[in-house]
Image: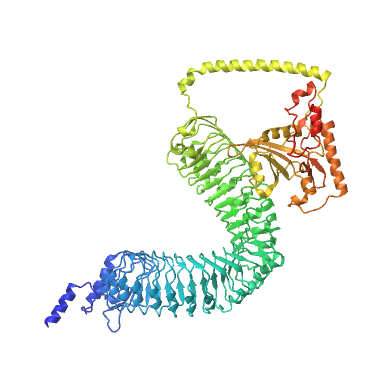
Amino acid sequence: MRGLHLLLFICLFFFHLPSNCFATNETDKFALLSLKSLISNSPFGALSSWNDSLHYCQWQGVRCGNRHPDRVTVLSLGSLSLSGRISPSLANLTFLKSLNLSNNQLTGNIPIELGHLSRLQVLSLSVNNLAGNIPSTLGNCSNLEFLSLRTNNLQGIIPSNLMQCKKLRVLSLGNNFLVGSIPPQFGFLELLNVLHLSTNNLTKSIPSTLGNLTHLSGLYLYENNLDGFIPSSLGQLKALEYLSLGQNNLSGKIPHSIYNLSNIVTLGFGLNQLDGNLPSNLCDALHNLQYMYTYANQFSGQIPISISNCSAMIMIDLSYNNFIGTIPYSIGTLQKLSWFSIENNQIKATGDDWRFFVSLTNCTFLQVLDLGSNQLQGMLPGSIGNLSTSLKILGLGFNPISGNIPAEIGKLTNLITLELGLTSIEGTIPKEIGDLWKLGRLGLNRNMLSGEIPSTLGNLTLMNALRLQNNAFTGSIPEELSNMQLLNTLNLSNNKFMGSIPKKLFNLHSLSVSLDLSNNYLNGSLPPEIGQLNNLAEVYLSNNKLSGQIPSTIDGCQLLQILHLDGNQLNGSIPLSLSNMVGLQDLDISNNALSGPVPDFNGQMKLQYLNISFNNFEGELPKDGVFRNASAVDIRGNSELCGGVPEMHLPKCVLDNQKKKHYSKSIIVIICCIGGIICLCITLFLIAHFCWKKGSYNNPLPFVAKNFEYQKVSYNDILRDTDHFSPENLIGKGSFGAVYKAPMKFENVTTVAVKVLNLKQHGASKSFFSECEVLRKVRHRNLIKVLSSCSSIDHQGNDFKALIFEFMPNGSLETWLHPNTCTNRPFRSLSLIERLNIAIDVATALDYLHNHGPAPIVHCDLKPSNVLLNEDMTAHVGDFGLARFLVQPDSMSSLLTGSTTGLRGSIGYIPPGTSLYILMRN
């Protein structure tokens, strides 16, 4: 009797420990009330019934046993948005078999006392905000069959003593912050059916002991930092249906035994460093395979033809690998296929290889077809319109596809994304694209498309992103684009759009990412409606012909971070309201005609970069804010600025009283200077007039330069039309510069040759002026015709000079006479008649220059590479960079540029006409 009293005393002293000492119903009730006391919020009133009005076995979520009607066996309070902590007193529910508190907002640690629930079979605490380590005491729950702690904030290592729970069938610890390795002891959980450890920070290799889990149907280890090889022992898991190892650092080859798992439904290996080929008999045993992910690895070889044997296949993602060859024509036999992506490989298609497109028309469930970034060549087949009407994503961009966009594409009325950017397609946008009324993303950027944008694009009212940049579109920007009320990104840059910016575009309040209309021919003023874009982050209007002032309403763009208005014709001052744009970080208003003082941009602005170069700003430069960092501000080309931080190297500002003191003296000096200059000009005019009248009777001027009005071409025009001096447009190089092909419109001319001078080369500037001097005075059918010139400043502030000539499609005579050294032209020998005609053309040009022009001119560098041939093989003499006017007595001397009597032309080569020039000079 004394021993029994002692036992009761111990139980009372350690009442918080689980024990069978208390057989009364008060024990379980107090444990439940303890949990309620730690629940801080129950928005659905789930615990409102937990009071004395009902027996606790009738409380919501509580269920008691049949054999022990006063003992709680099930506590299920999942998905009730409960906030608070888990009470350690739950350990006193010693008859508890199932505890479900999942999908709530519980915080704190998992009580270690739960490890004393020896009868517990189900413990689900997933989708909460629990932190701390996984209690190792849970290994004492020897009857545990289901343990789910996924989607919490748990840390530390996985306790290896969980292997003591021999009855475990489901172990789910994914989506936490667990570290360390996968305990190899898990290989002894012989009844385990699902092992879910994904989305943690687990490291080291996959234990080969997992191959002992013969009942395992699901192994989820994706999104960790696991490395090493995939154990071949996983091929022993004959019951395995789901194998997901993606987003790790696994390397080597996939064990061949994996391909023999006949029950497998999902194979996930994406985002690793795996290599090797897919076996030719890939689907011989994988008849149940539905999902195959091998994207972002280093797989190579061809896509196995046997892939068509996986008749249950739904999704195939082989993107971002090194696969070669063609797409199997039999791919169309996979009638359940919904997703097929081979983006970013080296797959080819020419001619009959496009038959796979026809076979894919059998895949009536196809929703995603991404073939972008491969080597698919030729024209898109019209069968594209016969693809599944369920198709939502079609990616064909970054392929050398040519030809036009088939009008049949308008039949794919469920398309959400159409990507055809970075190809070689040309022609116009078919109006049928306007039938794709569900389209949310359209990418046609960096192609050779031309013509006007069809107004039918305005039908695409669900559009989110429209990218048409880097093409040759003309005409005006259609107002119908304003119908796209969900548009967040609009990029029409690097085209040939003209006219003003439609004001309706600024009604698109949905524009939140970017508006890019740069590098076009847009004119007019910047509408004040721009201030309505109050959600927009980036605006690019650079290198157009916009004029007028920057509207003060622009401060309505409160979320704007980047504003580029450079390379226009804007004038006036910077509106003070610009300082209200607190989010602005990058402002470029360079290369305009802006004037006045520079605002201090103080206040709460986050400005990190400011470019005001090459304007007419004046006055003192501020010193605070962005102006403190000289490297973040570009002020070049504003000669009237002063002050600022010392690193700006500007002159000191003259104080107002000093200005007033010297004001009257300055006026007097200016008036005297102006008067003197006027007198001098009048005197020089009278002398020149007298000499001209005298000379006109005695020795008339042998030529009169005709005044030609050349079309003005800016540096930005040349930069845009040569695609930023792309090597693809380079057609020749010389000692003084390079020649580019460019699509420019002149009278009866649509393609020109732009000669860009390398001004770092000695003599290049002199060559430029010499060529200008000659070509502006001569006109002949066998001389190259100059269309315009450009003498400007590039975006780095360096001098820039270029000449624009008519384009000669048949190149130079050099490429015809020496085809072995000119690999860019197929060999064809010139006929005798062609050679004779070219010789006559060159001789006719020289005869004109020497004897019949406005003044005798010697070319000084006549050679085959400077003889250019047009489309009908008519020869034109070009490159007058070394040409010279022959000296004439008296009357001509004032018109001649300086010259020397030395040899001119290419090194090791004396051109015809040079000896004549030297003889006549001497």
Q: Quadrant of the N terminus?
A: bottom left
All told, the count of numbered labels is 0
**Point 54% across, 72% down: residue:** 291
- The foreground one among 471 and 197 is 197
- Residue 431 rendering spot, x and y as whole percentages: 68, 57
**Relative height, residue 62 to residue 405 (above, below):** below
- Residue 502 rendering spot, x and y as whole percentages: 61, 45
Residue 359 shown left or right of residue 249 in the figure: right
Q: Quadrant of residue 316?
A: bottom right
**Relative height, residue 391 to residue 186 (above, below):** above
**Relative height, residue 774 to residue 810 (above, below):** above
- The foreground one among 315 and 405 is 315
- The foreground one among 300 and 484 is 300
**Point 44% across, 64% down: residue:** 225
Residue 42 appears in the rendering: no
Residue 271 appears in the rendering: yes
Q: Residue furthest bottom?
A: 67
